[in-house]
Structures are given as structure tokens and as C-alpha cells.
Image: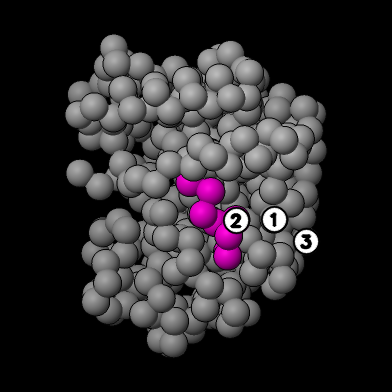
Amino acid sequence: MLYRKLGRTNFEVSEIGYGAWGIGGKQWLGASDQGALKAVQLAFDKGVNFFDTALAYNEGHSERLLARVLEHAPRPVHIATKVPPKNLLWPARPGIGIDDVFPYDHIIHSTETSLRNLRRDWIDLQQLHVWNPEWLDRDEWRRAFEDLRTSGKVRFIGVSINDHQPDSALDLIRTGLIDTVQVIYNIYDQTPAENLFPLCQQHNIGVIARVPFDEGSLTGRINEDTVFPAGDFRESYFAGDRKRQVMEHNAAICRDLGVPLEGLAALALRFCLSNPAVSTVIPGMRSLSSVDANTSVPGQGPLPPHALEALARHAWDRNFYQA
């Protein structure tokens, strides 16, 4: 495993982190808790030291699973979690005030709940799970985070930027009030590299790249015959003819780059890690085979310039989170 600085936190975090949404089990179905615990343990054994979860991942179940493996870990780990919006709306909606989403007491209570779930005295990185630039000058979230830091319950703070809206956090970064951003970044959505990443580098803000596989598209394993468990969120994400669209775009990437379809997942991770602004990439890893494959990628190095130039042509402007 290789490690990078997480911005000004000075944490040395593994290039491949652990995205723990999938192990929560409410929206990603078809895996067991025992399988999840084995995957988290193997990730730790492979050198992963950054684990990203959220209170909203099945009402803290993901946090509690991580605690079962990491509470007595023999070497330090960095755990990031998130405060859910009080109105439970993802993404944040324009025109909805912070009183309905992140009031002071809600941030404090959510953090204390996460601390109990994680069985820890402090949270390394606490994040707001959505962001609306209309809240920039409001006191509620600022005061809550400052009080949590002063009390020692939170070390650093960040935001998880709304889906496909990287520029919505630019003014927030300029304030100097946060330490990290978490943002969708993958071969299909390359927009963070335009404005967000240069600003993060300028202000020494850590970048957590999420959804590197576009919820599974870029693993190369989704085709028109793929069936998801009833109730799995991917039923709607890949509804209609979206699986066919994914297959066509994936095939074009593989032709251009001269890689087999089974090599697409590694290519997707190397793409993310090739940008020096990225501190860590957090794929979901619910199986031992996924952990093995993903944690082997850092040793393969960044993609060469000609490959990055080719991949720039495969950016795909769409939002599958919308119905």
C-alpha cells in the first residue's frame, strides 16, 4: 500500500481507502455482515488505514461493523463519518434553510451517536453529508464544529459535496473553515479536476474521491442481464436502458485504451490516483476478491499522459441518481 497526505490534517492515508456505504446493508443488498467483517479485516491487513462511513448508512450499522474490527486495531487507523441531513434529503435542495438540515443540536447529537457506534473517544474526520452554498455564512454548522473540536470529539472537518456539483464547494474552500472535501470523481465525471482540485491544492485541502466505479459501472461487471436484489438502490440507478448505455461506454474505453473489460476496474482506480490532488479513493469493498484487487492498484503507478488524454474523451455528462 502507498500513502498520501490528507491535506493539512497531516494524516498519512492509504491511497485506497474503504468506502463503507455498501456494508451498511440497507440500500446495497446481497451481502452478509460476516462477509463485511472479513472484508474490513482483510483491507486493514492489506494496509488500508482510512475508513469512510456515515451515520446514515443503515442507521449506524456500518459504523458499528467497522468498530467490531477496528476498535482494537494493532496500528492506527483514520475513521471518517458524516452527519446526516436532519430532513433526510440527498442531495441538499436549493432554498431549504440550514435550520431544517444542520441545526446546531442535530450536528452535536449525530456526532455523539457516531462516537458510541464507533466506540471511539474522537472522530478523525467529521463531515456534513450534503452541502448547500446558501449556508456558507450561517453560524449553526460553524459553531457546532468549533465546539466539537474544542471538546476533543472531532479532530478535523469536511463536507461531502452533492452528486455531480463539485463547484458548489469552491467558496467554502476559500473560507479556510474546512479541512477536506469528498466528491464524486471517476472516468465519467471528471469535472472536479477543472476548478475544485486546483483550489484544493492551493489551500491544502484533502480530497476524498468517492464513487470511482460509478456505483459499479466501471467494474465492467454490469451488463443487460444483470439483476440486482429487490430493493437495492442500483435497481433505479441502472433503470431503463442505462445498463446498455454503460456497456457501450465501457466498450469504447476498452477499445481506446487497449485494455480487456476485466481490467477496467483497475484502470478506473488508477485514473483517480493519477491526479495529484486526490488524497485517497474510497471504493466499496464487500468481498474479499474486491479487497484483493483494489488494494493491489497503488503499486501499478499513475497512468501515462497518453492514457489520461484518451480517457478525457470519455467523460460522460449525466446523472443516474435522478429518476
Q: CA distance from mark 1 to mark 3?
A: 14 Å
- Distance, label 2 to label 3, CA atoms, is 22 Å
* 222, above or below 132, in the image: above
Find residue 69 and report its image quarter.
Answer: top right
Q: Is residue 122 left or right of residue 238?
A: right
**The disc labelled 2 sits on which kind of residue?**
Ala
Where is 104 relative to 66, above or below? below
Viewer-nearest of discs 1 and 2 = 2
Mark 3 element type: loop
Give, as a three-letter code, the residue at label 1: Ala
Residue under the image location 32 percent in, 58 percent down: 91
Can residue 189 be seen in the rendering of this structure? yes
Q: Horizontal and vertical percent for residue 270?
A: 67, 34
Q: CA distance from mark 1 to mark 2?
A: 8 Å
Q: Quick check: marks 1 and 2 in contact, CB under 8 Å? A: yes
Which residue type carries mark 3? Asn
Residue at coordinates 36% horizontally, 50% vertically from top-left?
56
Front position in the image: 9 or 219: 219
- Closer to the chain start, of discs 1 and 2, is 2
Which contiguous range is marked in magenta?
A: 189-196
Front residue of 225 and 131? 225
Which quadrant is the C terminus positioned in? top left
Q: Position of residue 136 (x, y in %)?
A: 44, 81
Mark 3 neighbour class, 10 Å CA radius: few under 14, some 14 to 19, many 20 or more: few
Q: Is residue 307 magenta?
A: no
Label 2: which residue? 193
